[in-house]
């Protein structure tokens, strides 16, 4: 009977661990999806020449439009963001977030192009 109790306690502990892991990783799921999309779903061999011919200007303009719309629709509760100990305004904070997402996308392209050259 001790073996059955030990196995039951082990399963219960595993269930608690799985629940804590799920609740910890769930808020990060959109970022993981963003990275997976830009790393696996985009063919950077075809996209990079398009960006080099002037498509990057369109990406920058869409990013700026995203910053303005997001900043208008979702202002922070305190009126400013806390980034690395700094109090920055709403639009500057959103610009930092959108720039970070663009940098992650470009890094995924760099990783994909670097792995295909070898």
Image (cartoon, grey):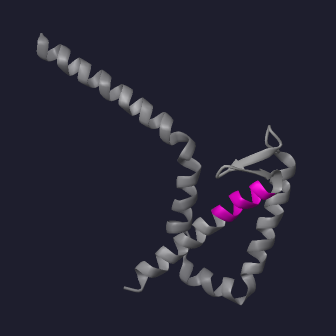
Residue 93, magenta (yes or no): yes
User: Vertically, is 108 above or below 86?
Assistant: below
Q: Quadrant location of the N terminus?
A: top left
Question: Percent x, y for residue 107?
Answer: 54, 71
Residue 80 location (% of width, % of height) = 80, 46
Residue visible at 54% across and 47% down in the picture: 29
Furthest-front residue in view? 85
From the top left corner, tell me how far across and down residue 54 is, in percent: 74, 86
| Magenta segment | 92-100
Does 108 sit left or right of 63 as displayed? left
Name above or below for residue 116 compared with residue 36.
below
Q: Residue at x 49, y 42 (%)?
A: 25
- Residue 109: where, in percent of width, then height? 54, 74
Label count reads 0
> Is 15 situated left or right of 51 in this image?
left
Taking depth in this image into account, of 69 and 116 the one nearest to the observer is 69
Nearest to the observer: residue 76 or residue 101: 76
Residue positioned 78% across, 76% down in the render: 58
Q: Is residue 55 above or below residue 17?
A: below
Q: Which residue is found at the position 87% from the left and 50% from the top?
A: 72
Outermost residue toward the top in this view? 1
Q: Is residue 47 magenta?
A: no
| Image quarter hosting the C terminus | bottom left
Q: Main secondary structure of the magenta part?
A: helix
């Amino acid at each position: 009977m001790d073996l059955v109790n030990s196995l039951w306690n082990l399963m219960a502990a595993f269930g608690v661990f799985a629940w804590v892991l799920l609740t910890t990783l769930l808020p990060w799921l959109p970022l993981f999806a963003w990275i997976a999309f830009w790393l696996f779903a985009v063919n950077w061999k075809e996209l990079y020449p398009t960006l080099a011919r002037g498509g990057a200007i369109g990406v920058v303009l869409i990013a700026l439009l995203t910053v303005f719309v997001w900043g208008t629709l979702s202002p922070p509760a305190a009126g400013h963001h806390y980034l690395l100990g700094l109090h920055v305004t709403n639009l500057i904070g959103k610009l930092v977030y959108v720039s970070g997402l663009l940098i992650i996308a470009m890094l995924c392209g760099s990783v994909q192009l670097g792995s295909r050259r070898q």
